[in-house]
Amino acid sequence: MSIRRQFVLVLAIFAVTLTGVGGWVTWRLTSGALEHELDEKLRLAGGAAAAVGLDGSFVLNLEPGDPWLNAYSQRLWELRRYVADAYIFRRDGTLLVSTEDPKVMATGAKLRAIEPYPEELERAWTTGDATTPLFRGLDGRYYKYGFIRLQQSDAMLAVVMRAEFLEPLASFRRTILVGTMAAGLLAALIAAGLATTIVEPLESLSVVALRIQRGRLDEAVETERGDEIGRLARAMERMRQGIVARDDQLRLMLAQVAHEIRNPLGGVELFATAAAEAEDPEERRRLLDRVRAEIGGLNRIVDDFLSFARPMEPEPVVHDVRGPLEEAAELARREIEVRDGRLDVELPGEPLGARADPDHVKRLTLNLLRNAGQAGMRVRLRAERRDSEVLISVRDDGPGVPSDLRERIFEPFVSDKEQGAGLGLAIVRRLAEANGGRVELVELVEPVEAEGAGTGAEFRVYFAAASIPADATT
């Protein structure tokens, strides 16, 4: 079932249930209150009977033809202001006086109309008065009997009152039914309108999602609304922009991969061919060393791309960062010294605790050291604790980062070097952020204290400092 139909059905059912149940409860309460009022009127009629001088003991002794029958019948007629009919009868149900013709009175006839109410009669003989449930008369209207015992005698007054309140109640019930159906219809219309304002934008967004899935990323997602659907649209627009950016990055990476691999492959092919044709063993060995060097460069390029492409899920632990830093320095020192450079390492004598993945710390430090070794001749690795953070600094004495690249130096494939894929610093930033840290380029104005050195560049990485347990190994 569609959301629109569910919305209409739920709201319509709620409106019908609320209106119907509310109306039914109101009708029941009103009906009960009016019926109670009718009972009170029947009791008032009994009080009126005493007021017009009906004597139960006296009327029990009247005989047919007694002129007092006419007088009592006339007194009952005075009750017609309140009731439809009135009767006086004996305990055995024999009719004595009524509002009908007095000639048929006191003849021993039974009042059959009261026979269906033995319990109410018994209560009236015991307590002095009682009322019966509603019943339908021959005219189709509803009536109610009220029984009033006359002066503790064996004479009982029965009055009949029409339940006039049922007619407006019936009209009220019809109104409730009509109102319930109208409420359900109105709720369905309102729900349909509300659902349209929700479903149509969702359908539009689903079309947009399909368009994005099919690769049509040039059209922006409309985000004018300020509600939840508008937030969803804005999220989809950010998703589209992210996909576009990743696609551009992927295309750039593929182009860069092709470019970076083509040159070393060309060198491998050239040196391998020359080695195959060389007759001098020393020359062949020299050419094969060049082949191995080019293959090593290819491996580093592939490693950089793999490091950048695969997810970096850290396993942060509290550890002494001096260990990973020393391992990275040992690996980088050989590469720096091959270029006649120098690596200085300044680490504190006491444990330097941080919460990070040790392998990630080693990898990002190695990347920074390699970049620094390619930029200058003298490289310095330093680490210390600053307040609640551990600072790792790598500085070189090279020409520094050009001003036009400073804002983009941590982006993928951005580099001021002719060689390399431009992923080293991008990987450093991803590794730092994956471990809850950050990396920054420090603007330097004073050159390194070395002859012919430039201003250089300094990169700083920060991790959350932590205390190392006394029994922990470093």
Image (cartoon, rainbow, N blue to C red):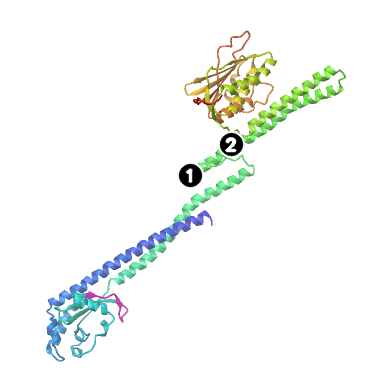
Q: Nearer the viewer, residue 131 or 293?
A: 293
Q: Secondary structure at mark 1?
A: helix
Mark 2 or 1 closer to N-term? 1
Res. 27 image quadrant: bottom left
Image quadrant assignment for residue 26: bottom left
Query: Left of 133 or right of it: where is 375?
Result: right
Residue tagged 1: 228
Kind of residue sitting beneath label 1 = Glu
The residue nearer to you, when weighing 348 against 182, is 348
**In the rendered image, which residue does mark 2 sit on?**
242
Vertical comparison of 182 with 397: above or below: below
The residue sitting at 58% across, 22% down in the picture is: 323
Amino acid of disc 2: Gly
Q: Is residue 377 magenta?
A: no
Which quadrant would the N terminus be assigned to in this image? bottom right
Vertical comparison of 13 with 155: above or below: above
Tell me the number on the disc at residue 274.
none
Decide if residue 147 is in sight here. Answer: no
Question: Would you place residue 275 above or below residue 226 in this image?
Answer: above
**Residue lying at the far front of the rendered structure:** 471
Alpha carbon of mark 2 to alpha carbon of mark 1: how far? 21 Å
Q: Residue furthest right?
A: 279
Instruction: Specify few, some or many for label 2: CA neighbours under 10 Å numbering under 14, 14-19, or 20 or more.
Output: few
Q: Position of residue 201 (x, y in %)?
A: 52, 48
Q: Nearer the viewer, residue 4 or 280?
A: 280
Query: Which region is colored magenta?
Result: 130-141
Number of numbered callouts drawn: 2
In the rendered view, does 401 fall on the left or right side of 224?
Answer: right
